[in-house]
Amino acid sequence: MDRIIREYQAEDLNDLLYVWESASRLAHPFLTDEFLEQERDNIPNLYLPNAETWVIEQGGQVFGFIALLGNEVGAIFVKPEFHGTGAGKALMDKAQELRGDLEVEVFKENTIGQKFYARYGFQPLKESIHEPTGNQIMRLKFTASESN
């Protein structure tokens, strides 16, 4: 079946939340349930209204998404069963096509995300503390001209 990347629509919300939660729990076992519950509420009420969001679907089923705030990747999540299938790369390619250079923040303990971003060509910029959780985060940058 063909995969399609298209703009997020309101009727995608339940699928998007499922993708986010399943991927978040896999990649972020160090985050508390309370923090994840708050983020689940923030997605439709705070993040989605302020981001340009694209979904990837197959057979009418959304299984991944990327949310952009300017050239910042605010979120990229793919259902765990689709990890390693090129879905994340396809979403990042879409973001790079739209924005060129990109930046992202990733939890230092998120080894899944770290490996993905390194493979894509992101380079570390700086480390800091994520205030809401007290966990270390890394800011990474992808420079489009260096990857071509």
Image (cartoon, rainbow, N blue to C red):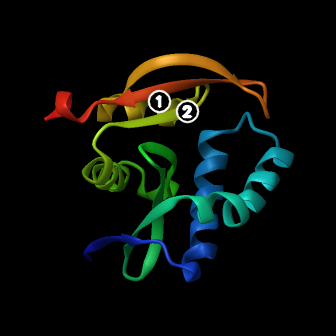
Q: In this view, does 137 lie to the left or right of 4?
A: right
Q: Is residue 55 left or right of residue 136?
A: left
Q: Which residue lies furthest to the left in this view?
A: 148
Q: Position of residue 36 (x, y in %)?
A: 76, 49
Judging by the rendered image, the residue that carries numbered circle 1 is 114
Labels 2 & 1 near each other (Cβ < 8 A): yes
Where is residue 105, by image quadrant? top right
Judging by the rendered image, the residue that carries numbered circle 2 is 106
- Where disc 2 sits, the SS reads strand
Q: Is residue 79 left or right of residue 94?
A: right
Residue shown at the point (42%, 57%) measured from the top left: 82
The CA distance from mark 2 to mark 1 is 7 Å
Using the image, determine if residue 16 lies above or below residue 82.
below
Res 1 label: none
**Amino acid of disc 2:** Val
Q: How crowded is mark 2: few (under 14 residues within 10 Å), some or many (20 or more)?
A: many
- Name the one closer to the observer, 135 or 142: 142
Q: Where is residue 97 in the image (x, y as percent from the top left)?
A: 25, 52
- Where disc 1 sits, the SS reads helix
Residue shown at the point (73%, 33%) measured from the top left: 30
Question: Which comes sooner in the sequence, label 2 or label 1?
Answer: 2
Which quarter of the figure is the C terminus placed in?
top left
- Name the one closer to the observer, 131 or 27: 131
Q: Which of marks 2 and 1 is in front?
A: 2
Using the image, determine if residue 41 lies above or below residue 11.
above
Q: Residues within 10 Å of mark 1 (few under 14, many from 20)?
A: some
Residue shown at the point (47%, 29%) measured from the top left: 114
**Amino acid of disc 1:** Gln
Which quarter of the figure is the N terminus placed in?
bottom left
Q: Position of residue 68 (x, y in %)?
A: 47, 52
